[in-house]
Image (cartoon, grey):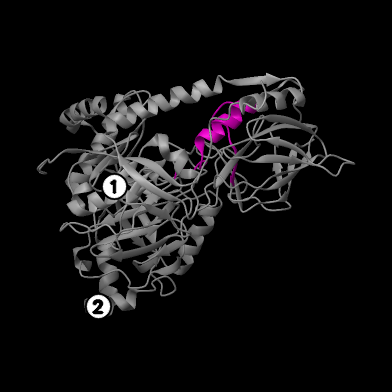
Amino acid sequence: MSALMKVTEGGFCTTVQDLGRFGCQAMAVPVCGVRDADALRLANRLVGNEEGMEGLDIIFSGPAFEVATDSVRIALAGAEVALEIEVPGAKKKRLIPAGESVRLERGTRFAVGSFSNSFCCVLAVEGGFAVEKILGSRCTCLAGKFGGFEGRRLQAGDSLPLELEGVVTRPERLLAGWFYRGGTDGSTMIRVVPGPQEEYFTAEAREIFYASRYTVTAQSNSMGLRLEGPALRHSSRGFNLVSDGIVTGSIQVPGNGMPIILFNDHQITGGYPKIATVISSDLSTLGRLGPGAEIFFKPLTAAAAEQVRRNHEHHFQQMCGQICEVQSSKEALALRLAACNLLN
Amino acid sequence: MAVPLALEFLSCGDTALCVQFGEVVDRDLCLRVVELKEAVSRAALPGVVETVPTYRSLLVHYNPLQTSAEELKDALAGLVEGGSNVEREVKRWLMPLCCDSEFAWDLADLSTQLQRSELEIRQILFDTELFIYMIGFTMGLLYFGDLPQFQQVSRRTSPRTKLAAGSVAVAQGSGVIYPVESPGGWNVIGNTAAPLFDVRRDPPSLFTPGDTIRFQAVGRVEHERIAEAVARGEYELQWEAGK
């Protein structure tokens, strides 16, 4: 028998993603991967997967499903959002907030609720999805129309194949503190390492870049976040380079002076000067930003950025150490309230 | 090698380091990049995730939990010093190219621009052993040169939204081959049915910078036959060993 999750609503853009397809960039195969890597790693920990297993990358609005296998265990992470689970015979839905795993049985219908404090969230499923591994990864490459589920976003009517037909009953896992938050409120600081082509910009442009606020525009997608703000003038060296390598987080500035932060699905090489590169620890933060979000840049040296990343990993593991097991939904609620200082 | 070496290490955040050999299009410079890629691969430096060669630089992706840019700079500088003794197998690819009017959308345009006959233009393409500079942009796009006769040809002012997979196009003394259907602004002068890029093959592209291409003229019927054989997985692109 096949293990499936039937898609009853696809959501705005829901794709199967892992931490990215590495190793083939020299052949110009884009890395892709989940927008909020921290959220995927956490959601996987909650359902008992390896941190890097594929999950669903959910952008802007949530999909809905029906369990078409004996049972599944799922968890959300990355935003203030809840699983809305239909209970047969009851009007009220059962809500499981992000940061908590839940086991659902055959026939259960559930939806990922609305979220506004992040542009995206992640749903992990115990055991992952039974989709083809291509060049070492199960992530979807939308531009290349391959990987994940048929190389595309999910839509109503799809049947998403699962690795496991059923999962055992066991205490569910919960991260009570929820001190890992998404957030698009106010201005977000994005730390960068200057370069690799700083000298292609005037001294004034470099000053403006670090002193100004930029807005993520609606023309953004998973290939790049197009920003709007004060234009950055190129120096006498112009703005055409002989093609050079690009990383996720490269901030390239074409002739119009408006920066573009290249994101997960970015092209592998490009010919525009890059003023700075977003540090790896802030890429998840960047992934959580949607159109309208305001950001500003803070420069760090590469050595400092490497240290920030090491600290980031340390904090992440510390946070995962706070995951506890709960025997009942009552206990889960008590833990959540305690974490909010509403209950001792 | 004849290239005056202006080696520079450029910061690309905390997970990549760019080793820049120069800022121009030059075969020897490109070969230095390829040599370093080979040397890095053989040295199996701890923390190196993968490397991406371009016309003039090698981008070294690394894991900052396992190494650092400072550590890598030392190791890479050492490899550049001792890197020129790498024996790399160069493949001289023989690639079928169909320049029927159905595929050569911009040949007439080019003929007007260059004041040369279409036959002459085709002849230049078939008579030149072309050098692969880079697999870049996205999905195995192949960049080749050198075609100094086409130096004055600019890209189209309005790029086409859809070019067929296998399109071969030129501009500013260089050429590209589009392995998958994509938008593009170069001047299309033919189509190859050769297997160029397939993510279900590892590696997905057959080509390496430093290899060469010689186009072989094929007619419409032969082009179709090759395309069908490729689809069945029964076509092997021919190459000769070079140096």
Q: What element does badge 2 sit on? A: helix
Q: Is residue A140 left or right of residue A188?
A: right
Q: Chain of mark 1?
A: A
Q: Is residue A201 part of the magenta span, yes or no?
A: no
Q: Nearer the viewer, residue A1 or A165?
A: A165
Disc 2 target residue: B113
Q: Nearer the viewer, residue A333 or A51?
A: A333
Residue pictured at 34% horizontal, 64% vertical = B169
Q: Position of residue A232 (x, y in %)?
A: 27, 57
Q: How many residues crowd mark 1 within 10 Å: few (<14), some (14–19), many (20+)?
A: few
Q: Chain of mark 2?
A: B
Disc 1 target residue: A210
- The answer as to whether the residues below labels 2 and 1 share one chain is no
As shown in the figure, which amino acid type bears the numbered disc 2? Gln
- Check the image and report above or below for B22 versus A328: below
- Check the image and report above or below for B3 versus A239: above
Q: Residue A12: name its quadrant.
A: bottom right
As shown in the figure, which amino acid type bears the numbered disc 1? Tyr
Is residue B60 something one can see in this rendering? yes
Q: Is residue B85 left or right of residue B204?
A: left
Q: Position of residue B140 (x, y in %)?
A: 40, 50
Q: Position of residue B82 (x, y in %)?
A: 17, 28
